[in-house]
Image (cartoon, coloured by chain):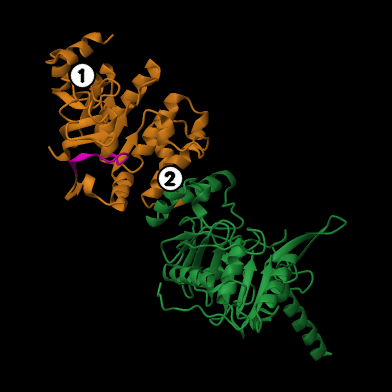
Chain colours: A green, B orange
Amino acid sequence: MNPGYELPLDEAAYSFGFLDEYAKREVRRAILKAVSIPGYQTPYASREMPMGRGFGTGGLQLTLSLIGPGDTLKVIDQGSDDSVNAVNLRHFVELTCPGVDTAERTAEATLIQSRHRIPEAPLTEEQLLVLQVPYPDPLVVVEPSEGKRKIMHGEGDYSRLLTKLYEDIVQFDEITISHRYPTRINGHYVIDPSPIPRYDVPRLHQSRALILFGAGREKRIYAVPPYTVAEPLAFEDVPFRTEDFREEHGNRRACARCGAKDSFLDEIILDGGEKTYQCSDSDYCNQQLAMRSAAVEASA
Amino acid sequence: MNKILEVRNLSKIHGRGCPQCFDTTGPAQDTNICPHCGSVVAAHDVSFDLYAGEILGIMGESGSGKSTVVKTLFFDETPTAGEAVFFDGDAQYELFSLNAAQSRWLRNHRFGMVYQNPHLGLNFNVSAGGNIAERLLMSDIAHYGEIRSRAKALLARTEVLPERMDESPKRFSGGMQQRVQIAKALATRPPLLFLDEVTTGLDLSVQARILDLILEIQQELSTAMIVVTHDLGVIRLLAGRTLVMRYGRVIEAGLTDQILEDPQYAYTQRLVASAL
């Protein structure tokens, strides 16, 4: 470290964005390395956060290291802006980062922290997506030893993951991984893309926005840089496929609230036992609804 | 005849080792534990050549260093000293100076190993077919249909019922597990196969069928093999040439018939005489 370097403190002698400057520098260094080696799980000194590990501490540390005055933050949990975790994280950033705006509209946000979903609306080059990751290593299901896993990653040896896919096809005639689908980034490292559904995996491919993954408990940061190849693992003759939202007649189900037929749907079971489907991305649903009512008004 | 493997002065010490290790161990000293530093000299000064399509036997009692030799050649253990060159068509590989990726490539594409204990060679958490698929996937075949048909053909060749290919090898008998291991080792049609006590612990009729299978494979694919065993019957049946090891040293080497009919060393004489 440069001995003459002084860490900037604001007037109140309290760092912007809760984390001290050393912590932010550590995270930013890890981010630079992660972006330079797409898909590589960069270890970093994960700090204690004022919430339990496993509640998005990795994502929050990334967010707090990246955010600055003038930024607009959107926090999503399971696609929704209004779930407890999302609301609390948003409040926390409002408290600790003066000058930062929060938003629910995807298009308005410069920084999006998310858990379980990538927003439906396409992201832009000006946006950053931070995903919270519970288990960063896709190989953990086939190899318990961390030392061996590192060697396997280094040598690009993912045959045992593929064997797992083979076993799935043998037993169930299709690959049964519903979320955390192993995805090869830039032709080498395979990542665990956090618990996003298969539906969102193609959004990693040639994404316009930088996508960062933070695992606070496991102390890893990795990245899918913009315009990078991301291929889900599959066989030549058994291609990767996303969730199928067709009903028994072969028609695509629509959202019961906004009528959209191009979004990831959550299944909701009503009191009577019937099922209904609704957009998982609440902001997208609201936008669709607003557009619809505007169209109705215009025609009336 | 094409040479496929050349091993020179292979040594392996377990422990820190000292300058006197090699002088104070061996058959003459009747030990392989160095009295000065307590290290175990598992193998010392082992040299041999192997030609394409040949079966070489390595014979000796437990702890004589037979398996150590094979394990170092298959990169399971790193040797203390020595050289080994693998000739693959026009290419030559110095086995002990390759980097990790190169040795993994050779291990997956050009070598095969069948262990005494199926737990070392097979993954019991996946099906028999999955075990073979794993090896094919390691050698960069990514077509599900092709993997499946090749796995089926290999298991049929090694007399495992194709109907049972999607079962875990946990539920197989010992002989069947061993046949799945052989199928797995053969999946990439390697020119060199290591067999470490493959028939030990199996009953006689199963042993006979596995040995038949190994001979047939050698005839069909002209695979070169190194067979490690303490069973003279296996050596007599399979190996054209044999090394006899004791306390980590090769004490006798030559044609199998010669060694079994006219052993030169007292230890080999005792070994041959004690055979049931």
Residue A157: % across, % down: 40, 52
Quick check: A85 above or below B48? below
Left or right of A251 on screen, residue A8: left
Q: Quadrant of the C terminus of chain A?
A: bottom right
Q: Give the chain letter at badge 2.
A: B
Q: Could you tell me if the residues under marks 1 and 2 are in contact, i.e. CB atoms within 8 Å? A: no
Circle 2 SS class: helix
- Circle 2 residues within 10 Å: few <14, some 14–19, many ≥20: many
Please tell me the numbered disc located at residue A62. Answer: none
Residue type for callout 1: Asp
Q: Specify the quadrant of the image occupied by residue B187.
A: top left
Quick check: B19 above or below A222? above
Q: Give the chain letter at badge 1.
A: B
What segment carries the magenta color? Answer: B74-85
Left or right of A154 on screen, residue A26: right
Q: Quadrant of the N terminus of chain A?
A: bottom left
Circle 1 SS class: loop
Q: CA distance from mark 1 to mark 2?
A: 44 Å
Identified at 39% across, 38% down, the residue is B184
Residue A282: % across, % down: 73, 72
Q: Which residue is mark 2?
A: B134
Left or right of B132 on screen, residue B27: left
Identified at 49% across, 28% down, the residue is B172
- Circle 1 residues within 10 Å: few <14, some 14–19, many ≥20: few
Q: Nearer the viewer, mark 1 or mark 2?
A: 1
Q: Which residue is mark 1?
A: B30
Does residue B26 show up magenta in the picture?
Answer: no
Residue type for callout 2: Glu
